[in-house]
Image (spheres, helix red, strand yellow):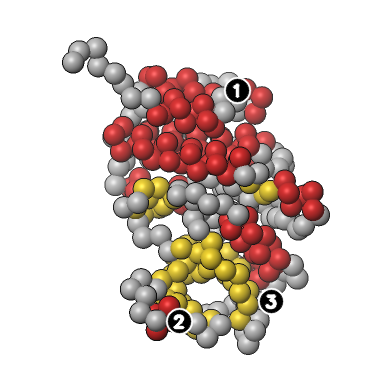
Amino acid sequence: MSAALGPPDLLAGRYQLERVLGTGGMGVVYRARDLLHEAFGEPSPWVALKLLGDSLSTCPDGHVLLYSEFALTRRLRHEHVVRAFAFEVDTVRQVAFFTMEWLPGLTLDRLLLEYPDGLPWNELQPMAVQLLDALAYAHRAGVLHGDIKPTNIMVGEQGLCLFDFGLGHAESQRAAGLPGLSHRRLNAWTPAYAAPELKDGGGPSVSADLYGAARVLYELAQGRRVVEPHRTRPLPRPRRLPRRCWSALRSALSWAATHRTVTVEQLRDSMAVTHRRWFV
C-alpha cells in the first residue's frame, strides 16, 4: 500500500486532511476533519490521522508495521497517553492509516523555545510526574515506547500527553510472532535522547525508555543548553531542578544501563515530593 498523497485530500470518503501536525521516522501525522461526525453535529470533529512516511510507504509490510503501532497504542488507556480510535484503509487509493485523538497544545520542543533557561519548578514538576506516570503505566502494560523525546510529548490544558509509539515494542508481539519494527532495518532513534545502548545497536528496553525520559526532564530543567552525557564526565545538576531530585535523575541518566539503578516509579516519586516548610 502507498501513502503518497501530495496535497491534503479526502480519505475513505470521510477524513478531510487539513494540515501536517508532524513527521517522524515511520509516518506523517495530519490534523483531519471527520466529516461523518461533523454531519451528526459533533462540535469538535477533528482527529489526528497517521500515514506511512516516504521511507516506509514502498515497503511490502509497511502497512503491517503501521497496524502494529496502532495496536500498541490502542491497548493503552491512560489519561496521559494518546487514545487510538481506528485502523482503516482507503481502498480506492490503497492507503492504510489510523486515527487517534487530536491534541491541541504545544509539543515540548516548542515549549522549550519559550523557556531558554528551563521551566520554573512549579511548571516542570507536574509535567515530570505526568510523563513518568504515563511511562510507568505503559511498562506495566508490557509496552515500550522506544522514542521518548520532546516532539513526542504534548502539553495542553488537560496536562501532558505521550504519543507516537512508532518505534514501540510489546513483549506479547514477540511471543505471538507478530511483526514489529527492526532497528536493523530502520535506525530511527533520535540521537540526543536515545540511550547509548540503542545507538550501539541494542533494542528497546525499560531502561532505554527511562533514559529517554530522563534526558527530556534534564532538558526541561536546564533549558536549551543541554550537556551531552559522557562515559566518565559527570553531568552538572540542571539549574531548575531541586537538589532532592538530582540523585534519582542522575542515576536515570547513567551512560551504562547497568548503572541506572532507579526505576521509572522511583524517579516519579522523587519528582512528586513536595518541599515541606518547617514553620506553619
Q: Residue at x 35, y 56 (%)?
A: 105
Q: Nearer the viewer, residue 233 or 182?
A: 182
Choose the circle earlier in sequence order: 3 or 2: 3
Find disc 1 in the rendering and name its residue.
Answer: 261
Q: Which mark is residue 156?
A: none
Q: Name the front one of labels 3 and 2.
A: 2
Q: Residue at x 39, y 73 (%)?
A: 45
Tell me residue 201's x, y (percent).
72, 42
Q: Nearer the viewer, residue 179 or 116?
A: 179
Task: Using the image, determine if residue 110 lies above or below residue 135.
Answer: below
Q: Which residue lies most toward the front here?
A: 40
Find disc 2 in the rendering and name its residue.
Answer: 36
Is residue 148 left or right of 274 when viewed as pictured? right
Q: Callout 3: 10 Å neighbours few (<14), some, many (20+)? A: many
Q: Callout 1: 10 Å neighbours few (<14), some, many (20+)? A: few
Q: Which residue lies most toward the left here?
A: 280
Q: CA distance from mark 3 to mark 2?
A: 24 Å
Task: Please state, as top left, top right, bottom left or bottom right, where the C terminus lies in the image.
Answer: top left
Name which residue type carries label 3.
Met
Tell me residue 137's x, y (percent).
55, 42
Is any atom of residue 193 visible in this view? Answer: no
Secondary structure of residue under mark 3: loop
Q: CA distance from mark 3 to mark 1?
A: 44 Å
Name which quarter of the figure residue 141 lies in: top right
Task: Using the image, determine if residue 17 lies above or below residue 140.
Answer: below
